[in-house]
Image (spheres, rainbow, N blue to C red):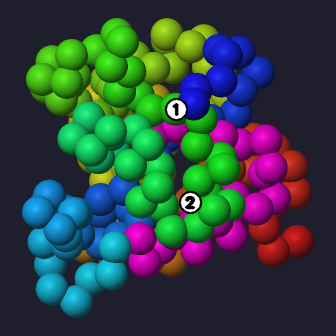
Amino acid sequence: MARKASSRRQVLYLDYDQVLHGTDVVLTNHGPAATQPGVTLFEHAATLDELLRPYSAVEIVLSTSWVPHLGFEQAVRALPLETLRRRVTGSTFEPQLDGPLTFLTLLRGQQVLLHVKRHGIQSWLAIDDQSLGFEGCRDRLVHCQQSVGLGAADVQTVLKMRLQAVFGGQPPGR
């Protein structure tokens, strides 16, 4: 569950759809399903895991609509790698504070910034395909192109540079 708020936290806000896989997802009776044929859900999870490896203190806070729709625990269990699941400490949707209908009307950037403010987080990045609501803090957003997500080499390069700039440590590849 969520850790106690601290301004020393290092947080990566993570969306799933169009980031960890190059498609949106619909909920079916059999669980989440890709809206595009031939796309494997979480196909870029290993890439994210590799890029985060040098940054052991970085937590993941889920900023995906999977949480209000499926619940926090189920959204975390959907991540295919235990190394990523262990990093998850919370979500931008906090049911004790947010009504799901009201929360989902906020732009993604507004959802993230609300969480940043509530928890006093100073050191953070977001990776998302939605850029609305991040005005004034675009340097904290790693923006993914739809249908490609984290599979794009240029997005991976930007993420590497931003991880180094925000969280310090030894950058990958050195």
Q: Which quadrant is home to the N terminus?
A: top right
Q: The residue tagged with tag 2: helix, strand or loop?
A: helix
- For mark 2, does the 10 Å Cα neighbourhood hold few (<14), some (14 to 19), or many (20 or more) residues? some
Q: Residue drawn 70% across and 33% down?
A: 10
Label for residue 34? none
Q: The residue tagged with tag 1: helix, strand or loop?
A: strand
Q: Amino acid at mark 2?
A: Val
- On whether residue 60 falls in the magenta region, the answer is yes
Q: Amino acid at mark 1?
A: Gly
- On whether residue 133 falls in the magenta region, the answer is no
Instruction: Please state the extent of the stretch shown in magenta in the rendering.
Output: 42-63
> Could you tell me residue 27's position as x and y percent?
14, 58
Vertical position of residue 78 compared to residue 22: above or below: above
Please name whichever residue, 100 or 73, is drawn nearer the observer in this view of the structure.
Answer: 73
> Could you tell me residue 71's position as x and y percent?
32, 39
Residue farthest to the front?
A: 29
Q: Which quadrant is home to the C terminus?
A: bottom right
Q: Residue drawn 22% across and 63% down?
A: 32
Q: Name the N-terminal-most of marks 1 and 2.
A: 1
> Could you tell me residue 42's position as x and y percent?
41, 71
C-beta proximity under 8 Å, tags 1 and 2: no
**Quarter where residue 57 is shown:** top right
Q: Residue drawn 37% across and 56% down?
A: 16
Please name whichever residue, 116 or 161, is drawn nearer the observer in this view of the structure.
Answer: 116
Residue named by callout 1: 90
**Quarter where residue 39 is shown:** bottom left
- For mark 1, does the 10 Å Cα neighbourhood hold few (<14), some (14 to 19), or many (20 or more) residues? many
For this view, does 169 lie left or right of residue 103? right
| Res 153 visible | yes
Residue named by callout 2: 158
